[in-house]
Each structure stands twice: as structure tokens, then as C-alpha cells.
């Protein structure tokens, strides 16, 4: 993977199947694909974009989507970082970090005031990435989660002003 040729691009309908493919591969590897996953992954326009969310893709030098991440708008200024996935052959090469930077830039561009995520303690490398960019562990603000697999709740609290 040549990170120098990597581009971070906004969602377009041509990437819809890649959004589902990348996330389903990751979910099947570590967990199970839950009904909420299939619904959101199959219809990102309805479940993420229609309410002011944003989806990004990491595209390699050959024009293939090798990673994705989304910002789901929860309420005015509040976003969930969600559906982050990187193709197996590209993991560990900086694609996740590039996607994270793109997501943080998109959050700032929307004048977001709170960014949170739900994850799993099984995902050590992902948690390390989140921590390295300023996400901090917090107790979940509500009982339960959208996802059975989630046992980690984090909020972005960067050292520098947003």
C-alpha cells in the first residue's frame, strides 16, 4: 500500500457497495453483522447523509476504496464517529489515521461541538488510534447501545482548541 497515492474523498453513490463491503468484512471478522448494521450499510443516504452526516472513503492509486468512515449526526452539533473500516490488505499502513484526520476535519467544518464513538475492548489497535487523536474513555451516557458488541464509549477531547 502506497500511502503517498491515497486520497480521502466524499461519498458518492458509486461508493455505496464499498461502504457495505468494507464494513461487513470487518464485522464478520470480529463480531456478527447485526440488523442495524445491514440497514445502515445498505442505505447510507437515508441513515447517515439525509440528516446532515458525512461519509468518507480512502481511495488508493488505482481508484479502489480501501477504507471508509462516517459521521452520523445525532443532534445539532453532536456527531457519532461510526462505520470505520479498512480493507485487510491496507491495515497498519496509515489508512485508518488518514480517514480519522478526514473525519475530524469534516467534524470541524460542520462546527461540531461533540464527537463520540462506541467501540469494543476487543479492538486494541482501533482504540489506540482513537486515543492518539484525542478520544477519551467515558461511561456511556445511556444504558445499552445501538450495538450488542459495544462496551467502550469515547468522546473526542483534543488538547488543542477545536
Image (cartoon, helix red, strand yellow):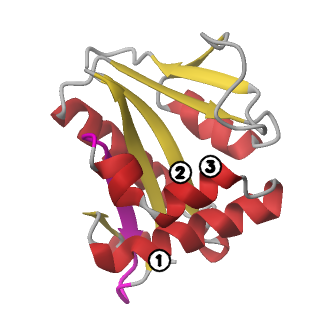
Say if 141 sits above or below 126 in the image: above
Q: Which residue is drawn at the image coordinates 80% and 64% (left, top)? A: 29
- Disc 2, disc 1: CB below 8 Å? no
Q: Which residue is drawn at the image coordinates 58% and 22% (left, top)? A: 154
In terms of sequence position, does the residue under pointer 3 or pointer 1 come before the other?
Answer: 1
Q: Which mark is residue 36?
A: 3
Per the image, label 2 sits on a secondary structure element best described as: strand
Q: Is residue 123 left or right of residue 127?
A: right
Residue behind mark 2: 83
Per the image, label 1 sits on a secondary structure element best described as: helix
Q: Is residue 24 left or right of residue 73?
A: right
Between residues 48 and 63, which one lies in front from this camera angle? Answer: 48
Q: CA distance from mark 3 to mark 2?
A: 12 Å
- Give, as a single range, the part of the protein colored magenta: 51-63
Q: Is residue 75 left or right of residue 37?
A: left
Q: Quadrant of residue 160?
A: top left
Q: Is residue 134 left or right of residue 111?
A: right
Mark 3 crowd level (few <14, some 14–19, many ≥20, 10 Å Cα): few
Q: Where residue 140 sits in the image (x, y, percent)?
A: 65, 14
Per the image, label 3 sits on a secondary structure element best described as: helix
- Disc 3, disc 2: CB below 8 Å? no
In terms of sequence position, does the residue under pointer 2 or pointer 1 come before the other?
Answer: 1
Q: Is residue 76 magenta?
A: no
Q: Where residue 32 sits in the image (x, y, percent)?
A: 80, 56
Say if 124 sits above or below 27 in the image: above
Q: Is residue 87 visible in this depiction of the protein?
A: yes
Say if 59 sits above or below 121 in the image: below
Residue behind mark 1: 17
Amino acid at each position: 500500500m502506497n500511502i503517498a497515492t491515497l486520497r480521502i474523498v466524499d461519498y458518492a453513490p458509486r461508493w455505496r457497495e464499498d461502504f457495505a463491503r468494507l464494513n461487513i468484512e470487518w464485522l464478520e471478522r470480529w463480531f456478527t453483522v447485526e440488523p442495524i448494521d445491514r440497514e445502515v450499510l445498505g442505505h447510507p443516504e437515508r441513515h447517515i447523509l439525509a440528516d446532515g452526516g458525512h461519509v468518507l472513503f480512502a481511495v488508493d492509486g488505482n481508484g479502489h476504496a480501501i477504507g471508509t468512515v462516517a459521521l452520523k449526526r445525532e443532534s445539532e452539533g453532536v456527531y457519532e464517529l461510526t462505520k470505520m473500516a479498512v480493507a485487510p490488505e491496507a491495515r497498519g499502513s496509515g489508512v485508518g489515521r488518514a480517514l480519522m484526520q478526514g473525519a475530524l476535519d469534516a467534524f470541524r467544518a460542520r462546527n461540531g461541538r461533540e464527537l463520540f464513538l462506541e467501540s469494543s475492548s476487543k479492538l486494541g489497535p482501533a482504540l489506540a488510534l482513537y486515543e492518539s487523536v484525542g478520544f477519551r474513555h467515558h461511561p456511556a451516557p445511556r444504558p445499552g447501545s445501538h450495538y450488542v458488541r459495544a462496551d467502550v464509549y469515547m468522546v473526542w477531547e483534543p488538547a488543542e482548541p477545536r
